[in-house]
Image (spheres, coloured by chain):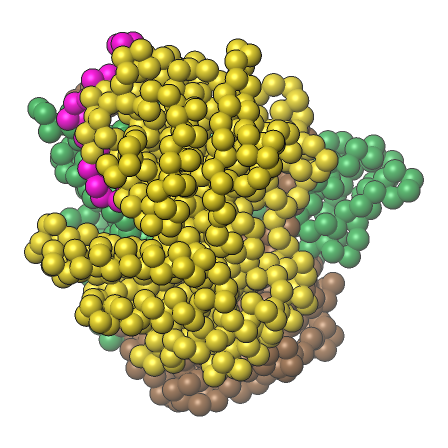
Chain colours: A green, B yellow, C brown
Amino acid sequence: MGIVIDKSLCIGCGTCLGACGSGALEMTDEGFAAVNDQCVMCGMCVDACPVGAIELKKDVGDNDISAYHGIWVFAQQSEGEILPVAFELLGKGRELADSLGEALTAVCFGSNVKNPEKLIHAGADSVLLADDASLAFPMDLPYADLLTNLIHERKPAIVLYGATAFGRSMAPRVAATVGTGLTADCTILEIDEETKLLRQTRPAFGGNLMATIICPNTRPQMATVCLGVMPALEPNTARTGNIERLQIKPQQFDAVKLLNTISEITGDNIIDYDILVVAGKGVGSKENMKIVKRLAELLGGNYGVSRPLVDAGWAEYQHQIGQTGCSVSPKLLISVGVSGAIQHLSGIGGAQTVVAVNTDPDAPIFGVADYAIVGDCIEFMQEMIAQLEEK
Amino acid sequence: MQAELIKPMSEDFADYLRDESRSIGHAEHIAFPHSEEEIVAALRACYQQGEKITVQGARTGLAAAAVPYGGCIINMSRMNRVTAMRHENGTYYLTLQPGVVLSELKKMIGSKKFDTADWDEDAKQAYVDFCKDGEFFFSPDPTETSATIGGMVCCNASGARSYHYGATRPHIHRVRMALADGRIISAERGKGRANGYDAVFTCEDGSQVSAKVPSYRMPHTKNASGYYAEKDMELIDLLISSDGTLGVMTEIEVTLLPQPQIIWGVSLLFENEQSSLEFVDQMRRTVEGVASVEFFDTGALDVLREQKRKSTAFSALPVIEPFVTTVVYVELHCDTEEQAQQRLFAVGEAFTKAGGKEENSWVARNQSDLDRLMFFRHAVPESVNMLIDQRKQKDPTITKLGADMSVPNEHLFDVVKLYRATLKENNLESATWGHVGNNHLHVNVLPNNAEEYNRAKELFKTWAAKVTEMGGAVSAEHGVGKLKAAFLTIMYGEKHIDEMRALKRAFDPKWLLGVGNLFSEKEGI
Amino acid sequence: MKILVCVKQVPSTNEVRLDPVTKTIIRDGRQAVINPFDTYAIEEAVRLKEKHGGTVCAISMGIPATERLLRDAMARGVDQSILLTDRAFAGADTLATSYALSLGAKQVGDFDLIICGKMAVDGDTAQIGPELSAQLGIPYVTDVCEILESSEEKLRCKKITDHGFAEVEIKLPALITVSKDINMPRLPSISGVRFSLQAPFRVYTAAEVGADVNRCGLSGSPTQVVKSFTPDRTHQATHLNGTTSENADAVLKIFEEVR
């Protein structure tokens, strides 16, 4: 078990030594790579090896997984309204279900959930709906309990969750209770043609690397999926399917009591704007946020920021765009001084036109931009402001 | 005049008439050269017309050296490329255009990311070595990291870590400079010295510039007051700290140092100022590996407390308990963790001996904690500026008045006593911080009105005389520029100022460069 | 109050630097640090201890060098710490990690509260807290940004939700994960550093905590990484190479078009 190096294939090139982040590989006197006890089994060397001589071996369990079928999408609601991410997941879920030749089921918990048929229109074959007053506000313990019981009972092969704050909080409780894997914040999902396993790709190392993960021996295969990266299907109102209202009384958990909720995002939400100016660390100072705000105002838009700016106290959380903030899809997004960590990029995937200004020509933001300006973003914004004020 | 290169001044360029000293000058033209050729072209054009020339970096200076008194501004902001790297005997050298910004330079060195597209093969090879090698850094660390390297060389800037590594000067290996008439000279460390007090530079066209090195003796303290002068001195040192009066730098080669393995910081919280000075005195004799020793007095801490209360921008600051009147920050650069630990405990012992309690300290042993203590240091001047801006709304004539004087070690207690007594006598509010390890404190008077402002200005002149008596320097790191020219005369006297004038005239006979910096053209003007 | 804090060692930077020639990852000398989110967990635990009395124990699963970071936690007010370190733990995903941590927690025994950072900055999964709560069968609240009230029996917390905040009450023993807004962690003092050098620290192997090796490390991890790659950034943008004024003009034209 662990890293195994096939000496008959190893050419002694040393590439793996450079790829190892733990200093766990060395060259033997015979000119082969060898692994020492620093190894944390991250698998970096497996990909780095140009001749495929390295393998991460693992004992295969004898779990019977043949009873698990179908794809589930957990459809989160808020005050009875199904969240947009549910439809995004169904879009992707449809594609996965078709390539597996299996059914797609939306699972929704709430109280007085409005229009569950929309889930069918968005691609689901059927809906499992638990509608009960106690489920009105998403709470980890009752939701996880209910979902765990359903999984045990009906055995889905795949369960997908939106990577919302709640999805990221509830799904791991389900995973650990069921005893299966969970891949967080996936940006790519696909079915392996040979093995029919779900290939789940997510950013690692702050987005500097992407990792593809599988869950071969336990079921269901579970993932939370980044918001705004999977396109929803156009609703097809002609689609029909069974909406099964579950006749179960959710268990009450008095260990955690909801006392009240404070809704902070009211009215002015950046996701509603067609024009956004989005600032990153490159704007230099809190003071310079005034320039960003002024430009946004002149363009009749709003402003967003990357996570470090919220962490630094330069902007409020409501303006944060990216994996842990919100996902936006404006007509025009002007990105200023944003380097473009993948977590941020996942939040701007829906933008129609992206203009990026950054001094670093290698900044990843340019990889998703339609227009690139290599230069000082403050100078650029001041010039924009001057030209707009002239008009 | 070269119309494209040299533009007439207009409203658009108004910002270029001022710098961080917040004084405002006037000019007729401005040029933003991109290359040495363009610098020379601009200089020649001015030389022909007899037009004065003021060189500018990032205008972060506090002594108004970059503020023009008429004529043409040559602004270096477009000359901001790193043009080569050299690897010799294990040392790395970087060739910089003078407009390279320090923060950018630090970032490039730290991340080992350079735009090498235009580099020659040798430089690219050096870069390959550099990438494989350990970590390196450029040690000069003025608080204002948006300064340009050219500006730093012009005033021999320093920072907290200059306590250990020295100011900018020792880290400058080679300088190329265009003279007012467009001729080019260069000087390299280790190559070329004055013969006694005779300095001779050979220009690229073969002509020579001969000058007499001034005969004064420089103070044995941190010093950025006027020309460097010493018998048999290295020629390059004459060009460093010349405040834009001898020529325009076109290229600067800097030396990189290996990054210390371990950097730890500790802030010590004192109940009274006297024990903080006793601590400094004790610690610098007993603890090794100290890279910087910084100081914050009650006035500074009170301003900080006030701004932290008012603004969320400072919420990341640690809570400063009411009993704390003085904070001393010590940074340790060490080879191993064991060594760092020993030294930290040695600091703790000196602290205890001076009446402190070890639990009243903040230790930073990783980057994010160091960043927090650094933020504390930067927040002090920033919050004082905010306070002054508030007061300015009531009286626009006032501004912050900051002293930049240093004295030898044996006068630390005397100079603090002098500051305290005279500030009290004059009933002036102040906030003091700075490089106490070098006995170099920035006493900042916070005037409430124009009358207090003027009183403070007079007080500073008396300090200049007293500090000179103690064998100190009137400007330790900000440079003299225009604002402190009068102090320089107090420090060296007219006779030596005349020697400086003669030196300048040898380089710049038409008296066009950096007019008003260091001294006036004629006595008493 | 007996409080447990989970700590993870992470690299001090997420930057992946590639050798310009060989294009392989350069290992740099920068030291590992405590996951920044965990520093808030440590501070909150120490504050609760200062208020209610009791002890704080830090727990980590990792390589032996993690001792240095656990000692750092002890310089910041933690009383004791334990490290789970064993070859059998290597290669663990979140499920296997939370299993190991749950065994560590049982060694400490009769705790009132476990505090975890909201997530680790290297993995970004935010799964350890909820999974550990499941392994121990205790209630949990994630994303806590303020503890409004605390007693030996329960906590009243403000937590971040998808649409703002919620106020919840949780009975102890329980687990919470905390966000960065919850506090401003203190820096250690010199006396704290002195304490940390001789503070109680214990290492446990898999066998010592009674672990089922099939549930640990690589064997106990249902997920496995099959491929890692640098993200595709070949998408071609149109470069605007004009002067600032020309570029601004061009962008304003784009603005007019989309509006």
Q: Quadrant of the C terminus of chain A?
A: top left
Q: Is residue B90 visible?
A: yes
Q: Is residue B2 magenta?
A: yes
Q: From the viewer's perspective, is C174 left or right of B341? A: left
Q: Residue at x 50, y 34 (%)?
A: B213
In the displayed image of the protein, which residue is found farthest to the right? A30
The residue range painted magenta reads B1-24
On the image, the x and y values in percent for residue A12 come to 83, 35
Q: Quadrant of the N terminus of chain A?
A: bottom right
Q: In this rendered view, identify the residue nearer to me: C91 or B381.
A: B381
Above or below for A321 versus B430: above
- The picture quadrant where one finds residue A263 is bottom left
Q: Residue at x 31, y 43 (%)?
A: B485
Q: From the viewer's perspective, is B129 left or right of A185? A: right
Q: Is residue C120 visible?
A: no
Q: Is residue B113 magenta?
A: no
Q: In this rendered view, identify the residue nearer to me: B204 or B508.
A: B508
On the image, the x and y values in percent for residue B102 come to 44, 39
Q: In this rendered view, identify the residue nearer to me: B191 or C68.
A: B191
- The picture quadrant where one finds residue A118 is top left
Q: From the viewer's perspective, is B200 left or right of C256? A: right
On the image, the x and y values in percent for residue A257 come to 30, 77
- The picture quadrant where one finds residue C79 is bottom right
Q: In this rendered view, identify the residue nearer to me: A201 or A37.
A: A37
On the image, the x and y values in percent for residue B274 come to 41, 77
Q: Residue at x 36, y 77 (%)?
A: B324
Q: Please state the total of marks drawn on the protein image.
A: 0
Q: Residue at x 74, y 42 (%)?
A: A17
